[in-house]
Amino acid sequence: MDTVTIGIVVFPGSNCDHDTEFAAASFSKTSTRMLWHKSHDLQGSDVIILPGGFSYGDYLRAGSIAKFSPIMQEVVAFARQGRPVLGICNGFQVLLECGLLEGALSRNRDKKFICRHMHVKVENNRTMFTSLYDDNEVLSLPVAHGEGNYYAPENTIESLEEHDQIVFRYCDAAGNATEEANLNGSVSAIAGISNREKNVLGLMPHPERASEALLGSNDGARMFEGLVEYVLE
Amino acid sequence: MAYKAKIRVTLRPSILDVQGKAVQHALENLGYSTIDAARIGKYIEVTINEDQVGEAERIGDEICRKLLANPVMEDYSVELEKIN
């Protein structure tokens, strides 16, 4: 394979779809496809990204209605084949709602919408999304969410730990998982998790908004680059 | 024959309800010193065109599990009222 096709799902209310397209298209061997939610056609995508935004206006619960979009049946089938699916912010919420990932996201602990750069630690660099990061590397990535407070029952958290599914945790600049650094109150400071097979990743921070130095950080770029390398291999 | 399903979706007691907390504080500020908890949920009305109450109950329960509630952090109840 000499080129990688990255499909970006567009729901009514998605608003990070073009930023994600920009970040994904910045590598020479990639092409992008915007996939409208009513379609059943993944257009030959090698990677699927569910972008951030407010799909269906966050009606009922964030991500709850998007999971019934026609395209999501195809995305779930694609994920079940072991192929890469990345959900960013609202995309993470959709992955939880459709059962590809475990747990739920509720209102931030301090009620506020949080829009700022945060530090996150790479807890697992042995995934197709994080292979270009060092283990325990501290990244600076922007977050922008009102419902990013990750919750799962204790036995689910234990199972996530046991199977190395916790991929990112909020931390301070030195990499310590302090209470203050965990701004939204997530259980175990979880910022991103994968499924057990490690081909589905959901995270609240926005790697596409940290894809070049001009944006204040390029720590997000290696996630897209890593995915491209993974598909090309 | 139809039934009106009155559906209540509430956060599990173990889940922090930040909206409820904000309302509770506002009530305290209004001087209601005997109010020590407020929790906010959703109320949804659905009309189900079924003759059999058993079938209406089944549908009411199913739509809560599939869409209206998130079983990870929410509980629900369905109350049916016969209409027309």
Image (cartoon, grey):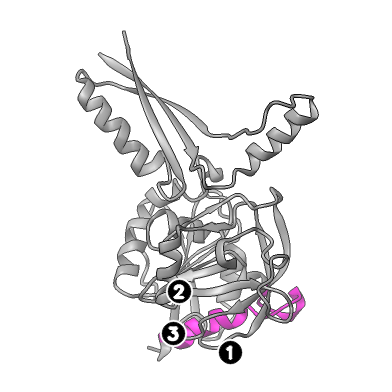
Q: Residue at position x 67%, y 39% from top?
A: B21
Q: Which residue is mark 1?
A: A134
Measure the alpha-carbon separation of dots 2 and 3.
Answer: 35 Å
What is the three-letter code of the residue carrying label 1? Asp
Nearest to viewer (mark 1 / mark 2): 2
Residue denoted by label 3: A3
Range of residues picked out in magenta: A210-231
Label 3: which secondary element: loop
Count of marks, rendered view? 3
Quick one: quadrant of the C terminus of chain A? bottom left
- Which corner quadrant holds the N terminus of chain A? bottom left
Query: Residue under circle 2?
Result: A161
Q: Position of residue B20 (x, y in %)?
A: 63, 37
Tags 3 and 1 touching, CB below 8 Å: no
Q: CA distance from mark 3 to mark 1?
A: 26 Å
Q: Nearer the viewer, mark 2 or mark 3?
A: 2
